Image (cartoon, rainbow, N blue to C red):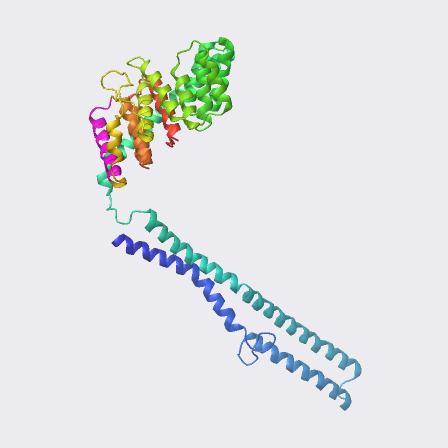
Amino acid sequence: MTIWIVLGAITLLLAGFILWPILSTRHQAATDTNGDDTGIDPNDGSANSDLLRDIAVYRDQLGEIDRDIERGVLSIEQAKAARIEVQRRILAADQRIKQQTENQKVTTTNGGLRIIAAAVMVAFIAGGLGLYLDLGSPTMPDRPIASRIDEINAVRQAEVANDDRKQVLNRAVSDLSQQLLENPNNLKAWELLGASLMALGRPEEAQTAFLEAIKLSGRNGDYLAMYAESLVRSSNGQLNALSRGVLNEAATTDSTDPRIQYYLGLADAQDGDIAAAVDRWIALANSAPADAGWLPMVVARINDAALAQGIDIEGRLNLQQGIARGPSQDDIEAAQQLTPEERQQMIVSMVEGLAERLETEPNNPDGWARLMQAYMVLGKTDDALSAYQKAGEVFADQPELVSRFDSLAKEIGIATN
């Protein structure tokens, strides 16, 4: 409650600090606009009323000069000089009055703008409060810094590990670039350069390296697959005509690179043919080696698509024990009988259970991939990023698997930079 009082007081002080000069100036303009057509009251005792009285005196003096000429007190030359001096004083006073009147008119004109500015400020403050009450969590209990030490340390360690990894990759890019300047026909160096740039999140630059590898290899299917992946990642996970053409060409070669069928399946899904995508991914998973680092991610894709679209895949996945085989038709029908609230509670419970298991048994790439995806589905982007970072730490000695995690994070929208 104390924090609300403090924040409310600060907000009111700031609002008053901004609105006071606006409203007070408006009030002053309103009180000053009185009197005759000049906007000045000659009886209000102000400097402007003194100027009006001075002008009246000067006019009397002009009449007095004429009378002095008639009485013979002043000569014609003396009267002319005196009249010029008095007229000069009248013009000077009149000019000052006009200047004051113009200033008051400007203030009056700007009064409407000041009212608008004040209204905008009030609306801004009220809108900010309303937005927080709608999107924020005013009832969430405080989280003292002492209770978050472990969480903060884990984030810092992940950041340090990520920085170290980037430094190693940047050095590799520099060394490989130097090697290729000396020997531009080094096929393996072009491949490693492209892979390093992909791991650094620079797919546009990696495309150049992979194109060189394609040219030097005689359009090898593996390098076509690498190039296609760089195209997909540079397009935020979308497959355009160029990437599809490259994948279709790669599929005609003898390459067994899993990226070919995986991304062709993703193209099917983006075209709305989820069943075709699942069929392609199941065939890919069933033909994969048991220890393939990318297999858990493909299985996660299959399971998610099957559950979302109500596709029965029971008995179709022939995988080793320990790899999730996906929901059966009974599981799908049972889930469909639940209310939206019950289904949400079930999903949250399953995700929490998965996260707990990974804390004790972290060597499970399938689990980390599913946890990342589950958090994004639930809208918990910070938790998804944390899962991505922890997975990178656990499998830091397996670059191919780390690259797959990077690719998955890019596809599902985890902000890794």
Prevailing secondary structure class for the magenta stretch in the rendered image: helix
Instruction: Say which quadrant the N terminus sits in.
Output: bottom left
Q: Is residue 306 visible?
A: yes
Residue 180 lies in the magenta stretch: no
Instruction: Say which quadrant the C terminus sits in.
Output: top left
The location of residue 120, given as percent across then percent down, is: 45, 57
In the rendered image, the vertical position of residue 214 relative to residue 107, given as above or below: above
What residue span does the magenta drawing correspond to? 342-362
The location of residue 123, given as percent across then percent down, is: 42, 57
In the rendered image, the vertical position of residue 383 relative to residue 408, given as above or below: below
Residue 350 lies in the magenta stretch: yes
From the viewer's perspective, tell me whether residue 190 is left or right of residue 296. Answer: right
Q: Residue at x 24, y 46 (%)?
A: 142
From the viewer's perspective, tell me whether residue 171 is left or right of residue 242. Answer: left
The location of residue 285, given as percent across then percent down, is: 32, 17
* Farthest-out residue, bottom: 71
Q: Is residue 170 visible?
A: no
Front in this rendered view, residue 29 or 312: 312
In the rendered image, the vertical position of residue 47 relative to residue 377, given as above or below: below
Q: Residue at x 61, y 78 (%)?
A: 52
